[in-house]
Image: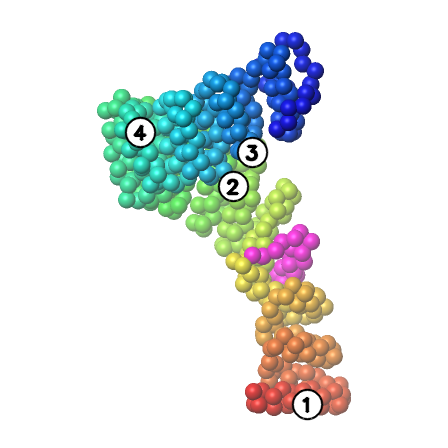
Amino acid sequence: MGTKKLIKWPKQITPSLVQHLIRAERDIEKAILVFESAAAEYSNGFRHDHTTYGFMISRLVSVNKFKPAEELLDRMKEEKCSFTEDVFLCLCRSYGRVHRPLDTLRIFQKMKEFQCEPTDKSYVTVFSILVSENQLKLAQMFHKYMKQVGVPPSVSFLNVFIKALCMKKETVNAALRVFKEMPDHGCIPDSYTYGTLINGLCKLGKISEAKELFREMDAKGCSPTVVTYTTLIHGLCLSNILDEAMELFEEMSRKGIEPNVVTFSSLIDGLCKGGRSLQALELLEKIVGKRFSANTIIYNNLVSGLCKEGKVPDAVQIFDRMKLQGLKPDAVLYGRLVNSLCNSSKFQEAANLLDEMVPGGMSPNHVSWSLHVNNHNMVVRGLCTEKDLNRAFQIYLSTRTKHILVDCETYKSLVGCFSKKGDVYKASQIVNEMLLEGSIPDEFIWNAVVFGFLHRTKVKEAAEVVYVELIGNFLETRV
């Protein structure tokens, strides 16, 4: 960091003025220059204190500039600047945010080196980060250390501890024991405590216990929040207990608790997977009525559910609505809809969707590739049955351009249809391309081309086709 004087400072420089100027700079490099320019005023009586240092460190870690932030921490020590734990906790949380829990521990250990005694707040923060990062062994060791140094239990700490215990099936009973013992430590469970336990029980399929806790919570005057309701609704949907999930949703409305997008998303997902996609469609209208924006996950679940139930026109309508809202369907969703259209013999619409995928840059991944290959072949064969050979040939050419495998049945359909139509040259072209791809035409394909030429009294061409077949058979026997 340079120390060049860049700003014309007043005679009286205050930390609040420096903070204001740093905050005004959106560019982090310019903010650093403001900080260093103020440091250049040390000879005039100004000194950075823990507030300006702390603010600059928070700006640096907000853009993941951790090394310069820690260098400022060392400068604070050199200048004998007072420390507060908030500076260290800012660094700890930031390392946690970028999934570097070991660095969180390192910064925590640095506090004593800088003569900054951590309070209970620091211990709970670090423990929470270790749990959130699923570093359960480290969290367990840190918990033992907390007990050794005499950190007393608190609601916030016990909530995190319960969350850690709920992460494993083997320890969820221990979480319930800690929950029941909370009043013995003078800690009354809050809505977060109940929500954490209900979430853990639902994930493990312990719906009865989760429902019991939910009712107990309400009975003890700890009002369930939208998060608690949504957690239990999600658990009920995962267990396909859809009627109770809908009852709970209606209870929210009666109690004046507004559902959020996650609530709607959980219900729609559950209803679609449970074969009740029309009911899910009704919920979509409620989302619009509450001025929420349905997200990609909601639309994906709806289209998939409608396709699964054979309600293809409804699926197409929702798919179009999704695009009109500015959301981009992925290749998997395109594939499902194309497949459903083919199964409903709507090959023209399926072909249109295949064409649409190209300009949109929809590239299938390794998971959806087999569906993608199958769909292209289905569309070509379907168009052949509908005698739309021009469109079938276009999709066939597109399939080859995309390096998608054309199967034997598709080749049969194309060759057979073009031969019957009398376009034996195009049929012959397809056979040649088939050979180039390493596929061996069967008897049906050879007969279709040969008889196609003979029907048009093209004996020479027919003889050439037979010759190619004979040569191919000869080479095959030699190999």
Question: How far apart are labels 1 and 2 at the CA level?
Answer: 64 Å
**Which of disc 2 and disc 4 is earlier in sequence?**
4
- Res 106 quadrant in image: top left
What residue type is disc 3 on?
Lys
Q: Residues within 10 Å of mark 1 (few under 14, many from 20)?
A: few
Question: How far apart are labels 3 and 1 at the CA level?
Answer: 72 Å
State how many labels appear. Answer: 4
Q: Residues within 10 Å of mark 2 (few under 14, many from 20)?
A: few
**Which of disc 1 and disc 3 is earlier in sequence?**
3
Residue picked out by circle 1: 467
Please state the extent of the stretch shown in magenta in the rendering: 344-365
Secondary structure under tag 1 reads helix
Residue picked out by circle 4: 146
State the quadrant of the N terminus.
top right
Q: Position of residue 443 (x, y in %)?
A: 60, 85
- Res 420 quadrant in image: bottom right
Question: How far apart are labels 4 and 3 at the CA level?
Answer: 30 Å
Residue 282, numbered label: 2
Residue 135: in magenta span? no
Question: How far apart are labels 4 and 1 at the CA level?
Answer: 86 Å
Residue picked out by circle 3: 65
The answer to whether residue 205 is above or below residue 94 is: below
Q: Position of residue 385 (x, y in %)?
A: 63, 70
The answer to whether residue 198 is above or below residue 427 is: above
